Amino acid sequence: MKQLFGTSACSFAVFLNYFKNNASFRFSTATNDAFVMEAWGRTSGGADAGIRFLADDSGELCTALGLSMETGCLVRSKRYSLVAEDGVVIHYFSSAEQASDTWAPNVVSAL
């Protein structure tokens, strides 16, 4: 089974439309606390579409992935998306060159 995993996407509505018709596991992470992630999932419609919003409030996950940014007082995550199949990353999208590289249409086309 393919799974989508990544930070927030500017074109989130495209992900929602895709997920309404597909059963893939999907996760969204951010270096926010659980309360912020719950509110974002609820107000964006993502939670209703089956997207799980995961808090990485300590930055442990993004640091382990080599995607952390130190901002002086907080650890933040660089923008990325990835597609995994059976626990193996098969597509990786990074905003290192352009933020648009991680936008939903690019990622959905890899699914």
Image (tube, rainbow, N blue to C red):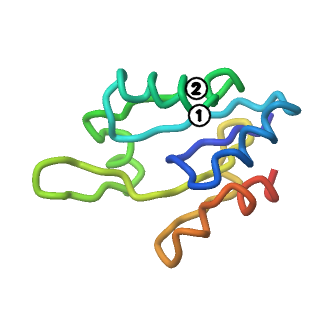
Q: Gap in Å between the C-alphas at discs 2 and 1?
A: 5 Å
Q: Position of residue 107 (x, y in %)?
A: 71, 56
- The residue at the far front in this view is 43
Residue under numbered circle 2: 52
Q: Is residue 62 above or below residue 26?
A: below
Q: Badge 1: few (under 14), some or many (20 or more) residues near its Cα, within 10 Å?
A: some
Q: Secondary structure at mark 2?
A: strand
In-image side of 47 versus 17 (left or right) = left
Q: Quadrant of residue 2?
A: top right
Q: Position of residue 67 (x, y in %)?
A: 38, 56
Residue under numbered circle 1: 27
Residue in front for this viewpoint, 59 or 87: 59
Residue in front for this viewpoint, 36 or 87: 36
Q: Is residue 58 above or below residue 50?
A: below
- Badge 1 amino acid: Phe
| Residue drawn at the location 71% of the way across and 26% of the way down | 49
Q: Secondary structure at mark 1?
A: strand
- Badge 2 amino acid: Arg
**Sooner in the amino-acid sequence: mark 2 or mark 1:** 1
